[in-house]
Amino acid sequence: MDLSYTFGECEQLTDVPEIPDTVTVMEDTFFLCKNLADAPDIPKNVESMEGCFYGCIRLQEPPVIRSTVLKNMRDAFRECGIRTSPVIPDGVTDLSYAFNSCGDMAAVTPIPASVTDMTQAFGSNYELRGDLVVYAKNPTITTRASIQHRRRRRIKRRRSHREAER
């Protein structure tokens, strides 16, 4: 069953009943549900929760993710009020923008080895402290700071090449 955008932009929604295990897709399910304070557990058969809780600013505690087949968490908690990331199940490959702009996020659970894309996953999280444990092999990790660092490094290389040519 697909619950994509089922409650999208229901701004007065504060909590929801248990989601059945027959659900396989939860893309944008609670998109911009600004008053959602209590998230339901993610069922065991969900494969994608892209944008699921995007913009749920009152959500402070992440849901329990029971899914054993989850692959896509892109934008899942973007612009949420959560303070820590949920336990990310092994098998997830896409975490890009998953926790971007979660202003109150202070801690992150370990990133499993299955993750291959973490582009801007934790961008604009100014309260984030501590170590980020990444078990993934060669994930794509791009943040604004890393882009600026690479740009500065390229400029330095160009300057040193020019000086060497003189």
Image (cartoon, helix red, strand yellow):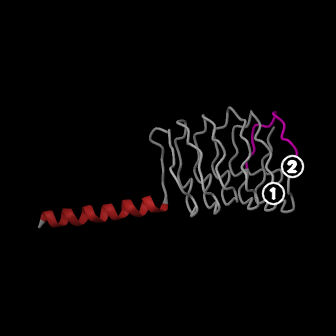
Q: Is residue 70 above or below residue 146?
A: above
Tell me residue 10's x, y (percent). Answer: 84, 59
Label 2 SS: loop
Numbered range of the magenta stretch: 16-27
What residue sits right under mark 2 in the picture? 16
* Label ID, residue 155: none
Disc 1 marks a residue whose amino acid type is Leu
Q: Earlier in the sequence, mark 1 or mark 2?
A: 2
Disc 2 marks a residue whose amino acid type is Val
Judged by its main secondary structure, the magenta piece is loop
52 to the left or right of 16: left
32 to the left or right of 69: right
Q: Is residue 29 above or below residue 151?
A: above
Tell me residue 34's x, y (percent). Answer: 78, 62
Contact between marks 1 and 2 (CB within 8 A): the answer is yes
- Quadrant of the snapshot with the C terminus: bottom left
Residue in the foreground of this view, choosing between 37 and 13: 37
25 to the left or right of 12: left
Occupied quadrant, residue 110: top right
* Label ID, residue 36: 1
| Residue 75 covered by magenta stretch | no
Tell me residue 117's x, y (percent). Answer: 53, 45
Residue drawn 51% across and 48% down? 132
